[in-house]
Amino acid sequence: MELGQPSALAGDNLSQAVQASRTLPLLSTDAEVALCHRWRDHHDISAAHRLAASHLRLVVEIAEGYRGYGLPFDDLAGEGHLGLMRAICRFDPDHGVAFGAYATWWIRSAIEEYVLENWSHETMGTTAARKKLLVSLQLARGRIEELLDGAVKRERARKPRTASRVSEQRYGKPTPGSRIKAQSEAHPSPF
């Protein structure tokens, strides 16, 4: 199979592309940087295909880590591949970061977004530990929302400063209450 051909990625089934990814050679760092420059500077589609084909095994490896959510593996790998495409489009080889490290972030992001949109406790399975985890996550989310609501209510309930307190703070003039307190301290009651 030719590395630069789109057929390395496109098949009737994504599983075939996943199998093909294991047979593709890895790129050297210099070849990877050269391909990134060709794509960024000249929009060379064959360079993008070679980058995608050589990093498809990274997509497969990351997608396998999300199998526990009960979602189809082909969908996870497909979303990871979309993340890889985003990484190819946005990567700048002049920043000195390895493309694989940069692509990993985008792949994970795409897969996690897909999982969050499509995951539910029904598809996850029904083991007791998983149910307990889901319930504890829901309880923690509820507590966080309560804390945030309480902070907003406290902020709204904060009493505004009165005019006498403002004048005392600005001009140093005592308020009537502070005068009475000062007089009682200066002239203690004989009782």
Image (cartoon, grey):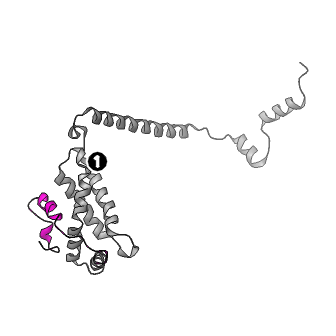
Q: Between residues 12 and 54, which one lies in front from this camera angle?
A: 54
Q: Quadrant of residue 98?
A: bottom left
* Percent coordinates x, y for residue 41 in the rendering: 30, 80
* Percent coordinates x, y for residue 168 in the rendering: 76, 44
Q: Between residues 30 and 148, which one lies in front from this camera angle?
A: 30
Q: Residues within 10 Å of mark 1 (few under 14, many from 20)?
A: few
Which residue is painted at 27% across and 32% down in the image? 128
| Placement of 88 over or under 63, stated as above or below | below
* Percent coordinates x, y for residue 123 in the rendering: 20, 40
Q: Is residue 16 magenta?
A: yes
Which residue is painted at 40% across and 37% down in the image? 140
Identified by mark 1, the residue type is Leu
Extreme residue toward the bottom, this view: 42
From the viewer's perspective, is 15 left or right of 60? left
Instruction: Give the residue at mark 1.
Output: 116
Q: Which residues are magenta?
A: 1-30
From the viewer's perspective, is 117 left or right of 150? left
* Percent coordinates x, y for residue 44 in the rendering: 23, 79
Q: The N terminus lies in which quarter of the figure?
A: bottom left
What secondary structure is marked by label 1? helix
